[in-house]
Image: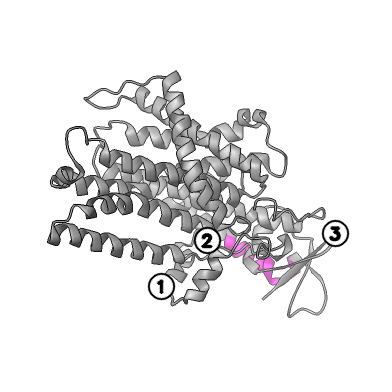
Amino acid sequence: MNWYYYSQSGKNGPYSETEMLHLLEDRTIDRNTFVVNDQLKDWIPLHDSTLARHAADRAKTNQAAQNSGGWVDNTTERINAMIGEKGPVDLNLRNLFSAVFQHHTRDEAEQIFMRGTSLTTPKEHELSAKWPKPWLFSRLFLLFCTIYLMLYLCYALFDTESAVSGLILIGSFAVPIVLVVFFFETNVPGNISILRVGEMFLYGGVASIIVTLILYDFVPVNVSPYGIDPFTALMIGIIEETGKLIIVIWFIKRMNTKFILNGLLIGAVIGAGFAAFESAGYVLSTLDRFTLYQLARSDDFLYVILLRAWESIGTHAIWTGIAGAAIVKIKQARPFQSKLLFHAPFIKLFAVPVILHALWDMSLPVMDNVLIKPAALIVVGWLFVFVLIHSGLRQIMAIQSSPHQGDSSKAAM
């Protein structure tokens, strides 16, 4: 059922019931706002509509979840408050990933990759504030797994040296590219093309590594062979996240985007590029006195590839995505100015990837396990991502509700 509300700018909508409840929570509308839906003949105050009852039920449900101590609900609501939003987060992962388990055609996949061109970018009033349902990333993941398995069979059964470089390439780039496609699918404004994404992944990924290495020259970090102490880990987090942030800002300024979901995509793509090239470097870092083939004969070869692949799920792409979203959330539709970096809301949100990065590198006796610590940090990182997606969807609703709405959806292409 479609809902509409009346404001000084006239009739606004259509909105789903969930979107109307979000507008009520954001105080874009209130209980005295006149509303109508497809079944009503006349406009009525919101407090006389079914929305009022559903809003009350929703408030009771949220309060009950808080009282019951549901850690996901409590954590996401705290994160939401931290980034400057109000109210609970409708985090329905089953719904978000529901399209993964449905049948899709090749035409549907091709249509996804056609997004972001001058002919396919939607107008702002055409955007949907509903949660996206990405699925293509899962098919790409299965494709990469199949290719990796085929290369492994070439290496294991036929003892061919030529498969080693392929294993390194696919193993290092598979997960970062899958993450890129996931964030491309969740970019609801649909105003960044796959060509631009590829440019950011390659140019941005390498450029961020170069900037990071330059920063390391200015601020040398000495890593002890006995582990990384908290101060050193924090310095590594600050240097690497700053190096990537510089490139993210360059792309955001160049594309002049105002959508939080754009910032999330730009940051995630550059972080994924950084992660892919870094992972390949880690695999090859022991090639001092060995050839590729000799390295492949050791157990470390496949172990490092698989370890870096699964860790990529929640490291650089996620961390830099958070930073990119933080920049756009502070910038909004204004031109970027360096003074925005000193605003408290940005510093607070940028501290998240820095701290996650530092904790990832830090030696923690209690959680220093190859699975436990990374898994915990990956979950925390993704919770921030989901809350920022929620914030991006609310931003779209707010833009559509604004009486001064403009159409800048094509500015980011």
Picture layout, residue 360 above or below residue 193: above
**Looking at the image, do the residues carrying marks 3 and 2 touch, with CB atoms under 8 Å apart?**
no
**Res. 353 in view:** yes
The segment highlighted magenta reads 47-58
Horizontal and vertical percent for residue 214?
45, 25
Tell me the kind of residue under disc 3. Ser
Specify the quadrant that holds the N terminus: bottom right
Instruction: Note whether residue 69 is visible.
Output: no
Percent of width and height locating residue 59: 59, 58
Q: Which residue is mark 1?
A: 101
Judging depth in this view, the residue of 308 and 356 nearest the camera is: 308
Q: Amino acid at mark 1?
A: Phe
Q: Which residue is mark 3?
A: 9
Q: Earlier in the sequence, mark 2 or mark 1?
A: 1
Instruction: Determine if the magenta segment contains residue 51.
Output: yes
> Which of label 3 and label 2 is nearer to you?
2
Q: Predominant secondary structure in magenta? A: helix
Residue under the point 30% across and 62% down: 147
Q: Badge 2 is on which residue?
A: 185
Image quadrant where residue 290 sits: top left
Residue 293 pos. (x, y %): 17, 46
What element does badge 1 sit on?
helix
Name the disc covering residue 118, or none. none
Q: Which residue: 27% across, 50% down?
A: 165
Residue 300 falls left or right of residue 324: left
Instruction: Classify 160 as above or below 345.
Output: below
Instruction: Indicate yes or no whether the magenta region holds residue 338.
Output: no
